[in-house]
Amino acid sequence: MSDFSIGSLLDDNKRASLQNFSENLPSSALKLPTEAAPRSKKDIVSRVAYLLGIDDRYFGLGQLDNMNPQFYRSVYEEMNQDKEARIVRHLCRLRTKLQRNFRDIYTEMNSDLKNIDSIPDLVPQDSLQALEQDGIPFVRAKRKLEDYIVDVHNYLIPHVPNCQKFLPEWIKWGYIRNMFFIPKGNTVDGNKEAARSYNEYRDLYPYQAFINWYPSDGDGNILRDDAKFLPILYERNRDRFYDMSKVTDAGDAALTDPETFFKQSERVIIAIDCENADPCKVIGIIKDLDSRGLTSKIAKILLVDDEHTSSQWRALRRNENLPLEYYLTDRVKDEKSAVDVALTIKFYREVAQNKAEGRPIDSAVIISSDCDFWPLIELTPELKFLIMLEYDNCGQAYYQRLQNNDIPFFYIDEYFMSGNVELKTEAVLQEVIHEIEENYLSKLNLLSVINRALSKLDLKMTEQEINQFLEKYITIMTVGFAKNGSAILQNKPTLKD
């Protein structure tokens, strides 16, 4: 391929824009919605958040008019009219406070002989009063703090099922119901066990609510919106949520399947930003395109990597059937990556080269959640673009810019919901095999082992004897692995007496 200067491809205005392509997006793209992001609905998470006792301020209550609440205030007002929903909300809110402030409340109750209705700075008195008004006499004399927490569980049992009416029928209610009930929550020991996990990983629980959940660093805010919450919820129940159209606004420009884009394209270039894309998810996308015969339209896959990114990209690079070009960038400064610049330059060179050869590229796929690639889209109007990104890594401003300019995008999370066992297993397996072959087997030579043994024993064998010994005794042995990962030599031969 001959070299092209990126400057020769752009006029002065485009060059000036390109020089600033890492700057913030214009203010017109930064206008946030007053209640919810348009890409995903928040009706489900608003209802779940209400029942879990998430603080009023996240619904916009007690806030200024220009605040941007996380959940729908209209949902709060609707559910707050229902007695059963109120009971569940205040029980969950109370349980969270009792667990979060356990030590301080315990000290007040045991040292100062107070009950929970006389510790307003630690226990929400409005929840105690609301429960009393709705027929739940929660406060009792001479009650231990541990027993109060058990009481919450027992009171929830008859009331949570009555709140199923607030969720649509297409949701598996059992998955949501389980969030309210701690395993063995009717016992002090069961709540103590749950409290240990809660206190250790409290910041990973949604809004620090005490619920039946096993948090993960990769989850983030599971109640961010419906499109994030339901896939994670189903995944935790060893299931998968498929119908993303139910949780995405009709006006969202997100595609539910990239196949239409590929069918409407003649020749496609795919640009992958390894710093801002999950390798397992991208591999899943490429494998799916290949299984549907769509990779035949791919002119080039540009894979631009940084020395600090994941070695999992090796799994994609080993696919010899793909027209893939891999480029590893160095860092001049440790804190500054050159991936986005390198990918932009290589992109323009590839487009120009194909055009010069009479095989023009008409479509492009950018796999990255980084808004730095917006100018590349803007400065190449002759191409149709599809952006593949991830929910958690796409900023609101970039999302809205894509929406406002009718640039289709595709959430790769829908193909790989952070738990696709098959793809994850394949990626790990390939990396393990590579590690064994490169770092262990490549350093093992059985002829050298035999020669070292002969030397230690001060013995000699002819070349023919060594070959016979190798074939008869050594090649029949195999290597197994113990549960702790240690290698074990198996089928070891023994000489007859």
Image (tube, rainbow, N blue to C red):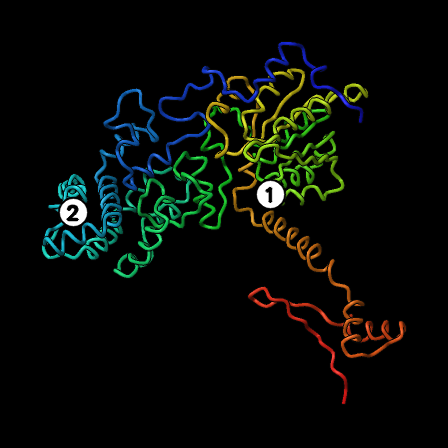
What amino acid type is highlighted by mark number 1?
Ser
Which residue appears at 27% of the width and 34% of the height?
A: 79
Name the N-terminal-most of marks 1 and 2: 2
> In this orientation, which residue lies closer to the viewer: 400 or 229?
400
> In this orientation, which residue lies closer to the viewer: 186 or 174?
186
Asked where in the image residue 123 lies, by quadrant, the reply is top left
Q: Under tag 1, what secondary structure?
A: loop
Q: Which residue is label 2 attached to? A: 136
Which residue appears at 76% of the width and 42% of the height?
A: 320
Say whether marks 1 and 2 touch (CB < 8 Å). Answer: no
Around disc 1, counting alpha carbons within 10 Å, would you say few (fewer than 14), some (14 to 19), or many (20 or more)?
A: few
- Relative horizontal placement of residue 224, taking residue 414 as reference (left or right): left
Q: Is residue 63 above or below residue 15?
A: below
Q: Where is residue 417 in the image (x, y as percent from the top left)?
A: 52, 42
Which residue appears at 72% of the width and 60% of the height?
A: 441
Q: Under tag 2, what secondary structure?
A: loop
Q: Position of residue 222 (x, y in %)?
A: 41, 40
Q: Which residue is label 1 attached to? A: 310
Which residue appears at 32% of the width and 53% of the height?
A: 182
Q: Position of residue 81 (x, y in %)?
A: 22, 33
What amino acid type is highlighted by mark number 2?
Ile
